[in-house]
Image (tube, rainbow, N blue to C red):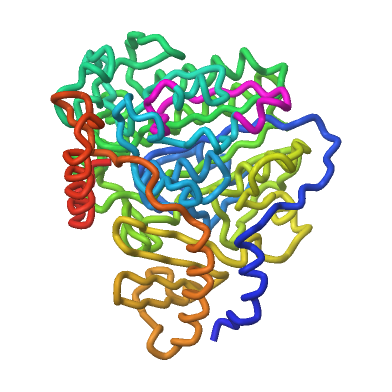
Amino acid sequence: MFKIRVIINSIITALVLVAAYPINAQQPPNLIVILTDDQGYADVGFNGSTEIFTPNIDKIAKQGARITNGYVTYPVCGPSRAGLLTGRYQDRFGFVGNPTIDPTVNNAGIPLSEKNIAEVLQPAGYASAIIGKWHMGTHPDLQPNNRGFEHFFGFLSGGHRYFPEELNIEDLSEVTKKWQWYSTKLLRNKERVEITDYLTDELSNDAVDFIQRKKDQPFFLYLSYNAPHAPLQATEKYLKRYAHIKDERRRTYAAMISAVDDGVGRVLDTLQETGIDENTMVFFLSDNGGPLTKNASNNGELRGGKGDMFEGGVRVPFAVRWPAKIPAGIDYNQPVSSLDILATIVAESNIDMSANKPLDGVNLIPYLRGENNNAPHDVLFWRGYTRGMEASRTANAKMIKHKQQKMLFDLSTDIGESDNIQGNNSDDFDVLQDAYQQWNEQLQEPAFPRLGSWDFKSQNAQSDKSQTEHKQNQSNKNLNKGINHE
């Protein structure tokens, strides 16, 4: 049906992909990655929203490429961000779930054996900043300033409150109750600081300042918004734009996206004002699909949401703009991955990767320019370690296996994954599953305790190994039941 066997050899080759990067004599481009948190696929104008207004985010798609089949590597934020930042499937280094925020655990995050985008670009003279959510490790060795980022303004954990008056905890060591870490004061590099404005606006302010300071050298800006992740909090400035939305939760969610959109507009304006717009690559995407219950998001026609291997969990709003190289107004429909971001900047900056680990992404520019009409990826994979789920996708066929349940969908005609055609196409399913198994053999087991394993009362989750293991097992059971406040 899908002619899957024709590409099986190239699928196997893709499992050990090392991208062939062309020589590029152009001045190295700047890279900006704007990442939202838990934003629904349908909650941007460029994906058809008429309820939530995103004119500035839409500029990225209209003045560059709208990626209709844009994916992340996991349907929950921690692993998804680890895949994006390393350009490698996070399962290769055991990042299978959101890491504990216990700062005494020295391996709960991206391991030191892996390089993130900032560490890859640093030897090439790039200045790098992360502004917003980190969630890649709270131990000092794993914090941004020790991982290639010269500037950090934000928070280390996986979620945060938005109103400055609610941020009163000086350090993670003061956290005694679950989710209390949502109220830590922000960090500017390694110092705790007070803020006076709505959190999303503070992050946007800092992004503008960084661009202005670094306009004369190549830079990487990781603008990692936590909006519209719960808790649902917005200021009247943004709420009043959405009086037409009667549902209070949905109205607040829309207002939170509007704050992000304002920030994106300021970033784009600053690129113009500083004269570096033409040679700055700007990616916009969400870290996973919108949750079905947590924040009033909308995934449109897609099935499922955050935590699912269905499209609603892993297909996200995705656009890229680079005036010097990418023609405006492209709708690109082949599957693209967040893994491709690092591969693209490495290729276009002519960075030698021979001493680094192989990337799983590809340089997108030849595809977006129409210079390569093949699909960027023969296959994409997802492993849901804690839930026993596995998935893989070719151009149109998508396989999902959950325990004994087998599913196969034709995404060219069934974007909502409503018609399981596995029964009449068992051979095609088996080919995709075999490819998944070959990939799976390259992966690692969980490398660290997951979120929820920290004993907040003693702040020493490692002091009693049996207690930690018990909490880890309980955390996994809760996750399987759909209890997810990540």
**Which quadrant, please, contains the N terminus?**
bottom right
Residue that lies at the very extreme toward the bottom in this rendered image: 424
Residue 344 vs 14, above or below: the answer is above
Of residues 230 and 144, which is closer to you in this image? 144
Answer above or below: position of 304 versus 253: below
Viewer-nearest residue: 280 or 113? 113
Residue shown at 48% from the left, 36% from the top: 111
Give x and y (percent) for residue 459: 21, 24
**Rendered location of residue 240, percent (x, y):** 28, 30
277 or 93, which lies in front? 93
Q: Is residue 404 above or below residue 40?
A: below
Which residues fall within the magenta stretch? 119-140
User: In the rendered view, would you say 378 is above or below 93?
Assistant: below
- Is 128 magenta? The answer is yes
473 part of magenta stretch: no
- Picture coordinates of residue 221 (x, y %)? 57, 27
